Structures are given as C-alpha cells and as structure tokens.
Image: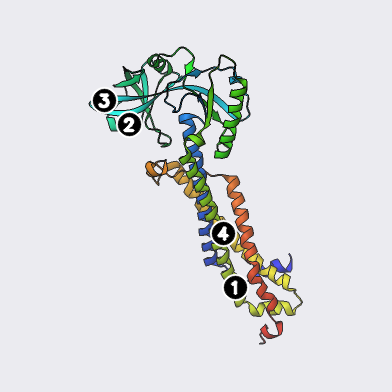
Amino acid sequence: MKAGAFIAGRLGFKGKMAVAATAISFFVIILALSISSGFSRQIRAGVASLTGDVVLKSSYSALPTDTAPISESPSYLPDILALPGVEKVEPAIYCSGIIRREGDITGVIFKGVEREGMQSLGAVVPAELARGAGIAEGESLTAYFAVSGRMKIRRFTVEGTYDTPVSTGLGYVVYVPMQDLRRVLGWGEGEVSALEVTLDGNLRSSERMRREAARIGIIADGGASGEDEMAACISAADSYAAVFDWLDLIDVNVYAILLLMTLVAGFNMVSGLLILLFRNISTIGTLKSLGMTDRAVAGVFLRIGARIAAKGMAVGNALALLFCLIQGSTHLIRLNPANYYLSYVPVHIDIGRILIADAASFIVIMLLLLIPSLFISNLDPASTVKTE
C-alpha cells in the first residue's frame, strides 16, 4: 500500500456534514434529471399517440380539421416508410363536431382511425369527457357535423374510454371508425385527412422532428405523381410549439440546477477539507519534515475528500433512485394537467445521463478541492510541528 493511501486511511475524519450536504446535492441532481427525462419522454410520446410526430396533410388545409382529403396510399409512401427512424405511417380523418348528451353540448374533434375490433358507429371517448358528461360504456351519444352547409347527425355507441396521455390544447378527441367519417364527409374510399408518421423515440427532440419533417416533405414533393394531391408536412414540434418550447425550457433549468448543486456540493467539500487541514496542521508539518512533498501531502487529503464525495454521491444516488421507483409505480405526487400537461410527476431513470452527471459533478468537486490543498504549500514544518 502506498504511504499516501495508508495515511489517508489512518486519519480519523468522517465528515458527516460534508457527506450529508453532498448527498443532498446529488439527490437533487439525479431527481432533476429523472423528472426532466420523464416529462420529455411522456409528453413527446403522448403527442405522438394523438397526432403522430410528423403529419402529412393537404396543402389546402389550414387546420387539422379542415375537410380537404389526400390519398392514404400516395406513390411516395414506400419511400417514407424506408427512411431510417420511421416506425409507421397511419392514415387518419379529422372532423370537428358537437356531441349532445341529456341537454349538455360539447365541442369535440372526431378522429377516424382503423382500429381492430371497433364496430361501425362505435366511439372511444376521453375518460375526462365521459366523467363530465356522465357517459358510460354501452350508452349512446348524438353527434352533429356541419358539412358543406348542411347539418348531419349520427348516433354513436360508446365502446370504451381512454385516459388522455397529455393535454395539448387540441380539445377532446373522440375516436370513431374511419369509414363512418368518410360517409359523413362524403369522401371516397382511400381518402383521408392526414398521414401520421411515428418516429423512433430517439428522434423526438424538437430539432430532430423538424429535420425529419423537412426530409419527409422533400420526398412528398419530389416523389409525388400526377395523381397525388399536394401535401404539406409539419412536425409536432411546430404544431404544438408551446409544449415543446416548455420542454426545452425544462432542459435549460435542469442544466442550471446541475451546475448550482455541483457548486454547492463542491464548496461544502472545500469547507470540510479546510476543517480537516486546520485540525491536522501538526500532522502536515510532520509529514513535510519527514521529506514528503507538498504534492504527496495534498494527495493524502484529496483522497479523503474523494472518499467523502464518493460516499455522498452514492447515498444521494440511492435515495434519488428509490424515490423515482416509488413515484414511477405509485404516481404519488400529482400535478394540474392544465399547467403541466400531465396529471402526475413523471420520472424516467436514464442511466447514461445519470452516469455522465455523476462523473462531471465529481470531477468539478475534485477540481474545487485543489483550492484548499494549496494551503499545504504555505505551511512551514519548523513552525507547525509540535514538540512534546
């Protein structure tokens, strides 16, 4: 065993306060990373489940609910499916309407989908809408559609409810069979409002979605035949800019928290190491008088500091991961979806980001510990060694 490591092990300094302060800092860091990652994954996946990551719609449609159809099987569809990162392309029909239930009138968006097991004139409604309107499974609801200046009425049977994954401001979305909406709108077979492109989860950052939307748009423009309708391509990051800007702001805040907590832990460690140095001035003088260099003596105390920092990091990580496991399984802490888009605090344990944050914070703390170690070079062995 090297002399420095042996001496560091013999010096009796537990640094409980420094360990506690470091543990709290790492607890906050890991918690911030996990919550940020949870928000990002949950909201992006929720938006994708509602409208897709990239939407191809008619160039003549200003809004998703405008009734300008495109083909569900354009000539360029195989080229889009062949793009790396594209998981699937699904057709959808959007149509705004009003539902009436025992005198209550609510505006909704009807989304026609091809869902296995859904019966004709069946509907799947948001659970929040079902609770508010008193709609139960198996009951009927009357829907009113304004199409080409005429009012069309359909009676749907509620086949089930679903929990809205994220509040995007789109309003209530009621899922119905695509063929039913085709008949309401008077469209032919194969005509849809949009093609919804779902991307791989790693491509769901704002920048990447916009880049993929641009690539898909180029393919749609360049690969369209004379029979294909003109289509516009828009990413979810542009359709729901407020949501994605909010997510980007969260990431900025997380980096600020990471830096702040690292500095807090570092300066707590600096104060702890200074206390250790002042307590062992005579020991430092003795070691220097025995021929130990300033660098070697500093290494002794840096080893102690590293041990305390590592212990605090381990405790903070363990507590944060335990909290994440509890919150992830119980959704104990709730949120107001009107303000935070979700009804609970989401967490996602991203091991890669956690390891990077731990390593970066530990390195910064050790660099800060070099500051008090400079104190050693200013000590004169002759004036510090105590004689008995």
Q: Say if residue 347 shows up in the picture.
A: no
Q: Secondary structure at mark 1?
A: helix
Q: Secondary structure at mark 3?
A: strand
**Marks 1 and 4, how far apart in space?**
18 Å
The reply to whether discs 3 and 2 touch (Cβ–Cβ < 8 Å) is no
The reply to whether discs 1 and 4 touch (Cβ–Cβ < 8 Å) is no
**Marks 2 and 1, how far apart in space?**
62 Å
The residue to which callout 1 is attached is 274
Q: Which amino acid lies under the numbered mark 2 shown in the image of this protein?
A: Leu
The reply to whether discs 2 and 4 touch (Cβ–Cβ < 8 Å) is no
Q: Residue furthest right?
A: 291
The residue to which callout 3 is attached is 101
**Marks 3 and 2, how far apart in space?**
11 Å
Q: Quadrant of the C terminus?
A: bottom right
Q: Residues within 10 Å of mark 2 (few under 14, many from 20)?
A: some
Q: Decide which of 292, 217 is in the foreground and name it.
A: 217
Q: Quadrant of the N terminus?
A: bottom right
- Residue at the image point whose x is 67% and y is 87% from the top: 387
In the image, which is nearer the foreground, mark 4 or mark 3?
Answer: 3
x and y percentages locating residue 148 in the rendered image: 36, 17
x and y percentages locating residue 181 in the rendered image: 40, 18
The residue to which callout 4 is attached is 262
Q: Decide which of 315, 95 is in the foreground and name it.
A: 95
The residue to which callout 2 is attached is 129
